[in-house]
């Protein structure tokens, strides 16, 4: 049986999630042995118009990028969004809070009017094309990416948690950040990072996006118990979820 052809593409982002692939170190060799890498700008000069799996990093901020993404979608059997920029728009969506002409001016100064520096409101990949699987996080957890790819290669549906970060946090025996008078988005954020931030003494800021069907009522009860308001919670969401619809309870 021929190996699946895998291509990796990037749009507007810091490329930190691709770096996480490189950070797999020895494990990358076992993964590469299972697939046929045909395009990856960061690591090889080859390009290809045919591939089975497209791993796509970054968000869409220009009309021409949206067209390129549609072409990738047409060519790929499976499209995987890689990291918060791709899955929810990520930090790039912060710019949607401002006038885009002012944003261009602030970033590019006198060069802001150049045609190739055009910009439009940031969109996540699934606001433009169908996305088959999402590897969440900013950056991604490379072990999770490895597990998702191995599942796909074995013909299984990858496991992507549908419970909140609090579950992993409790499993790790971590003292809740609310006890330190902090606001943590763990109750409404999708697990899968192993509660990376609370386990290291920082509150979750929601880089993995909202969990499916979040228990907003329970989150509100937690907030009320610690003397916080929903507005406090929303202010914590500004970094990653300010442009996402607040989940209904
Ligand atoms: S999700 Fe975070 S680490 Fe990954 S490309 Fe975007 S900004 Fe960089
Ligand atoms: S609110 Fe945050 S710190 Fe508290 S249990 Fe949930 S994830 Fe952990
Ligand atoms: S704890 Fe929250 S902010 Fe930290 S990695 Fe996990 S989802 Fe992202």
Image (cartoon, rainbow, N blue to C red):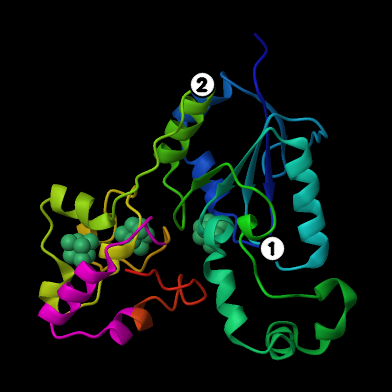
Residue 98, quarter of the rendered image: bottom right
Residue 59, quarter of the rendered image: bottom right
Quadrant of the drawing holding the C terminus: bottom left
Q: Does the magenta-highlighted stretch encompass residue 133?
A: no
**Residue occupying the far right of the picture:** 115
Which structural element holds mark 2?
loop
The numbered mark at residue 60 is: 1
Can you identify the residue that label 2 sits on?
155
Between the C-alphas of marks 1 and 2, the distance is 30 Å
Left or right of residue 210: residue 170: left
Question: Residue 48: where, in percent of width, then height?
Answer: 81, 33
Left or right of residue 166: residue 44: right
Question: Residue 197: where, in percent of width, then height?
Answer: 28, 60
Left or right of residue 198: residue 85: right
The numbered mark at residue 206 is: none
- In the rendered image, is residue 210 in sight? yes
| Residue depicted at 27% across the width and 56% down the height | 165
Q: Residues within 10 Å of mark 2 (few under 14, many from 20)?
A: few
**CB under 8 Å between discs 1 and 2:** no
**Residue occupying the far front of the picture:** 249
Query: What's the magenta region?
Result: 210-233
Which is more foreground, mark 1 or mark 2?
A: 2
- In the rendered image, is residue 58 in sight? no
Is residue 183 shown above or below 76?
A: below
| Residue depicted at 64% across the width and 66% down the height | 123
- Along the line of sight, which residue is nearer the eye, 135 or 19? 135
Question: Residue 74: where, in percent of width, then height?
Answer: 78, 40
């Amino acid at each position: 049986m021929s190996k699946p052809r895998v291509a990796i593409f990037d749009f507007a982002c810091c490329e930190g999630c691709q770096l996480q692939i490189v950070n797999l170190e020895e494990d990358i060799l076992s993964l590469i042995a299972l697939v046929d890498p045909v395009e990856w700008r960061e690591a090889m000069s080859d390009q290809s118009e045919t591939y089975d799996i497209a791993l796509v990093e970054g968000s869409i901020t220009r009309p021409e990028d949206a067209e390129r993404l549609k072409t990738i979608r047409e060519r790929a059997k499976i499209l995987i969004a890689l990291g918060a920029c791709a899955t929810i728009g990520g930090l790039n969506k912060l710019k949607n809070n401002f006038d885009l002409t002012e944003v261009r001016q602030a970033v590019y100064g006198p060069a802001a009017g150049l045609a190739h520096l055009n910009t439009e409101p940031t969109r996540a990949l699934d606001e433009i094309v169908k996305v088959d699987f999402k590897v969440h996080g900013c950056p991604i957890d490379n072990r999770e990416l490895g597990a998702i790819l191995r599942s796909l290669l074995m013909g299984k549906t990858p496991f992507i948690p549908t419970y909140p970060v609090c579950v992993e946090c409790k499993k790790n025996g971590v003292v809740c950040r609310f006890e330190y008078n902090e606001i943590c988005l763990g109750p409404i954020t999708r697990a899968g990072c192993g509660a990376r931030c609370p386990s290291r003494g920082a509150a979750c800021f929601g880089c993995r996006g909202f969990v499916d069907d979040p228990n907003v009522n329970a989150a509100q009860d937690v907030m009320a118990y610690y003397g916080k308001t929903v507005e406090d919670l929303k202010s914590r969401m500004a970094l990653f979820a300010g442009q996402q619809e607040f989940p209904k309870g």
